[in-house]
Amino acid sequence: MSNLLKQQISDAVKTAMRARDTARLGTLRFLLAAIKQKEVDSRQELTDADVTAIIEKQVKQRRESIAAFEQAGRTETAEQEKAELAVLQAFLPQAASPEEVDAAIGAAIEQVHAQGITGGPAMGKIMALLKVSLAGRADMSAISGKVKSRLG
């Protein structure tokens, strides 16, 4: 079991402490707390894939918060969320290119149709395949929209 990502986050916390970067430190501590909570709940040490899933969840929450704050006209709070989002995204893998995303969607659709699955269940199977192949490298809500348009 590799814990490289968790160690990188711990090292980043120490670096932020030394640099007295309170904004970055707060975000990283919150992330480490979420990781430790998941470890306690599951009673096992997390892999890099598990940590990436936690970071993705945090990124999704920040994006939703940013949209809500901007809609409410709270630009200062939205900017704070954007700063936290940037800190979190630094720990995610390199984003997939649009060509990679389209190729992955095409392959997943072919694979599911080869199994004879169509309609609503096909969407679920396709998204499950894409979640594995594009984990941490693409916004799954955007991918979902692309899959729906390709299926419809």
Image (cartoon, rainbow, N blue to C red):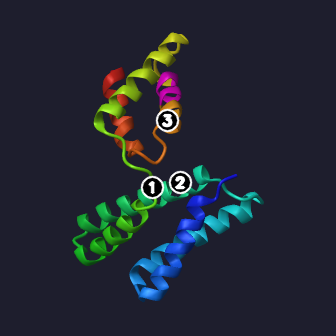
Q: Which residue is drawn at 72% across and 59% down?
A: 45
Q: Residues within 10 Å of mark 3 (few under 14, many from 20)?
A: some
Callout 3: helix, strand or loop? Answer: helix
How many numbered marks, from 0 up?
3
Cβ–Cβ under 8 Å for marks 3 and 2: no
Callout 2: helix, strand or loop? Answer: helix
Residue bearing mark 1: 92
User: Type of residue at label 2?
Assistant: Thr
Tell me, for residue 66, which label it has, or none.
Answer: none
Q: Which residue is drawn at 42% across and 45% down?
A: 137
Cβ–Cβ under 8 Å for marks 1 and 2: yes
Tell me, for residue 52, which label it has, or none.
Answer: 2
User: Type of residue at label 3?
Assistant: Ser
Q: Which residue is drawn at 39% across and 49% down?
A: 94
For residue 52: magenta?
no
User: In this view of the protein, which residue sits in the foreground, 61 or 82?
Assistant: 82
In the image, residue 110 lies at what x, y percent?
44, 16
Residue bearing mark 3: 133
